[in-house]
Amino acid sequence: MDFNQFPNSNIFHQLTSDELETVSLKEGTATKTNLGAIAVNTGFFTGRSPKDRFIVKDEITKDSVFWGEINIPFNQSDFSSLKNKIINYLNKKNLYTRDCFAGADKSHQLSIRIINEYSWSNMFAYNMFIQPSEEELTTFNVDWTIYNAPGFLAEPKLDKTRQSNFSIIDFSKKEILIGGTAYTGEIKKGIFSALNFLLPIEKNILPMHCSANIGKNGDTALFFGLSGTGKTTLSSDVSRNLIGDDEHGWDTELKIFNFEGGCYAKVLDLNAEKEPEIYAAIRKGALLENVIVDKNGDVDFYNDSITQNTRVSYPLSHIKNIQTPSVGSAPKNIFFLTADAFGVLPPISKLTSSQAAYHFISGYTAKIPGTEKDVIEPTPSFSACFGAPFMPLHPSYYAEMLSNKIAESNANVWMINTGWTGGGYGVGKRINLKYTRLMINAVLEGKLDGYTSKDFHIHSVFGLAQIRHCPGIPNQILSPRISWANDEAYYQMAFKLANAFRDNFKKFEKGTSNEIIKAGPIKFS
């Protein structure tokens, strides 16, 4: 163990969760809650800052990274200079360090060393990454190092950052610098971004921003979806084992494996009735972020006065029905989740391989009033591969890999709209979670396996194979057009959304096959 960079620091290496909790409470940086978990406030930043995430442009990345507004280039010499400043800043401080793994499949694991300024940041790392055994620690070789200094503020003009906070990845040095922000999600997403570059190129492994679970018969299901679409909720099923809730790989042997050792779930409006698995996981060892805690230690999950992005991290061991190890077979079913606030997309439809690639690249959901500042009406939101901020390569690279693996495994791909029916936001209503679960269960239990073309209706705008009937679901709910009871208004909105899809896709057309491009909605002007 070499920490010669910090000769004047007190190094606290590999502390347990209990030890880190004790330190955080003693320092006064955390509050004990009546649920047993501790709660912290991450300060000014309560979410990631995508415009302040950079990748060093060098011989490794210059011709491979899909450079642009998401993957912003950073100079090598500026990285080195900033790293030296961070090391000088961290020297003389108490540092909390950890050696851990990313990747449940040992043949594809990344060995990580994390150097944290804050004790509770290290507790987050304890929860979210895979902890080595005592034997593994004796032979631990560090692949990547993360320097996490929330209290360090960059000087933009000197350090060439956009503002005082930053997250920068250097693939040559195999290092990540995080400063000016205490939001812990930057730590896990930094490593996820690194894996999203390394695994496809070096090992032909598809990295995925999705949750995964597995049934008693060994059937794996994947759930892709942006925030608010139900990814964590719908993959948490008492009848199936959870492989993981956010980041996975799909390898050449058609195995699915979790990258992480924990879950990082949103907790706004959380209650024990609707999400019992997540609620029960919030106990000693869990770390709550930016929630309101009263003087008695009670947590108000409905209070969003700090942020709507209230979170909890906890190790997978806090979930009763987990898959051990966090590995599954090739998926039999893949679900693309979208909360369509325009009420246009069917609650459930089946996708062809080309449609799956198109909608994977699109990564659609909708923002509704209140979810973000200045959002006053439903707004289309697209995030390539359901995780654009973490994807260094061109989205079509990942989409082609997904198409090939779907073909190899003969997986079914479904689009599930967890958004609105009977009209858009403000007119219609949100699709009942009970119905969404029934649709997904019908797929997982094989109740739709015998369906033929007569059981589907091809959507006239989006070309999706819309299911006509599903056990336990009223037929009128399955047809968004019928649920509107106003054909003209429905098609006006459908064409409006279709145009938004095509406008968004223009930036990906270069480098994407015509077959995938043609799988989008029909043209309308």
Image (cartoon, helix red, strand yellow):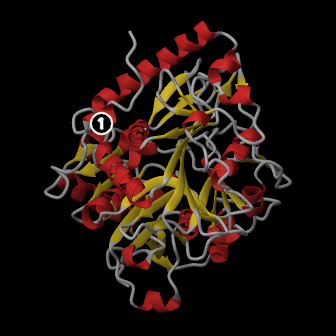
Residue 375 in percent (x, y) is at 56, 22
Label total for image: 1
Image quarter where the C terminus lies is top left
Q: Residue at x 17, y 58 (%)?
A: 60
* Between 282 and 399, the one nearer to me in the picture: 399
Which residue is pictured at 54% across the width and 54% down the height? Answer: 333
The residue positioned 67% from the left and 75% from the top of the image is 18
Badge 1: few (under 14), some or many (20 or more) residues near its Cα, within 10 Å? Answer: few
Dividing the picture into quadrants, the one containing residue 72 is top left
* Residue 370 pos. (x, y %): 63, 26
- Single out the residue that lies furthest toward the right: 296
- Give the quarter of the image for residue 363: top left
Three-letter amino acid code of the residue under disc 1: Glu
Is disc 1 placed on a helix, strand or loop? helix
Asked whether residue 258 appears in the rendered view, the answer is no
Q: Quadrant of the N terminus?
A: bottom left
- Residue 487 visible in this rendered orientation of the protein: yes
Residue highlighted by disc 1: 515
x and y, in percent, of residue 33 in the image: 78, 59
Where does residue 238 sit, x and y in percent of width and height?
74, 61
Asked whether 233 or 96 is in front, the reply is 233
Q: Is residue 449 left or right of residue 105?
A: right
Q: Is residue 129 positioned above or below 450 on the image?
A: below
Q: Foreground residue, 362 or 414? A: 414
Among the 4 quarters of the image, the one containing residue 49: top left
Farthest left residue?
59
Seen in the image, is 80 located left or right of residue 369? Answer: left
Give the answer, above or below, for where 90 lies relative to 133.
above
